[in-house]
Amino acid sequence: KTLDGLVEAGYLSSEQKLSSTTYRFVHDRIREGSYALLDSEEERLITHLSIGRRLRGAFGSTPKSDELLLLVSQLNLGTALMLDPDERRLLAELNYQAAEVAVLGSAFFPAAAFLGKGLTLLRDGDKTASWSHHYALTLKLSIAKARMEYCCSRYDQSMAFADDVIKRAETLDERQLAYNTKILCLESDLRASEGCSLARDVLKEYGSPLPR
């Protein structure tokens, strides 16, 4: 009823979709003014976290692409108050899924941001802890993060994540994608000789050395 009253007053617009109703501010200035009414940073964090949790519950376990991006964006803004390790791990996975959606739209910079947020959630202040406690998800996020940084032409950042995977991955097959990304970065950064040298080392590790 309160939301319908705001629609009648001209602050919100509404759109009926099957069994649900979507409400939007009619102008960015109204949204910004409403946000400014929240008195403290903690109150803003609480609001974002509450909205994100409500959206997660409403959208269920398989949200649509636009729903996924919306709920992840809200939850990400409230992570400072998200203390449950299981909830943080779930959000890290959702950030990976959000990155996949962003990549489909060639939105590489947002995708890189989602992946970075996922890693931050797993690390919780300790970079090595995520590899110990969440190995598979950390590996998946790190490989994707390295590739997205490459797609954003941020080669140094890409190689840093690739090197982390190369250092911590348990098998050669798991390191292979990181090697591939690093070689691409070296070639794009006009360091082709280093890329060729690394490629030779990788082939040697696979047992197929090339003659020099």
Image (cartoon, rainbow, N blue to C red):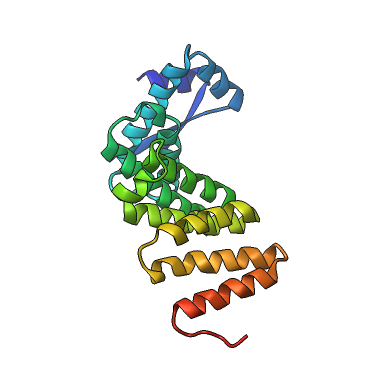
Does residue 107 show up? no
Looking at this view, is 185 or 205 the one in front?
205
Does residue 138 show up? yes
Left/right placement of residue 181 relative to residue 61 reads right
Looking at this view, is 146 or 60 the one in front?
146
Left/right placement of residue 49 relative to residue 157 reads left
Q: Return the residue found at the far right.
A: 190
Q: Work out which quarter of the rendered image holds the C terminus and state it.
A: bottom right
Q: How many labels does the image show?
A: 0
Q: Work out which quarter of the rendered image holds the N terminus and state it.
A: top left
Q: In this view, does 208 lie above or below 36?
A: below
Q: Return the residue found at the far bottom.
A: 211
Looking at this view, is 17 or 128 the one in front?
128
The residue positioned 46% from the left and 61% from the top of the image is 166
Image coordinates for residue 123, horizontal then vertical, percent:
39, 41
Q: Is residue 184 above or below residue 25?
A: below
Q: In this view, does 82 lie above or below 182?
A: above
Give the quarter of the image for residue 26: top right
The residue positioned 56% from the left and 86% from the top of the image is 210
The residue positioned 49% from the left and 25% from the top of the image is 12
The residue positioned 58% from the left and 49% from the top of the image is 109
Image coordinates for residue 35, horizontal then vertical, percent:
51, 20
Image coordinates for residue 129, horizontal then vertical, percent:
35, 44
Image coordinates for residue 211, horizontal then vertical, percent:
59, 88
Give the quarter of the image for residue 135: bottom left
Left/right placement of residue 96 relative to residue 112 reads left
Looking at this view, is 48 or 185 the one in front?
185
Q: Is residue 20 above or below residue 42?
A: below
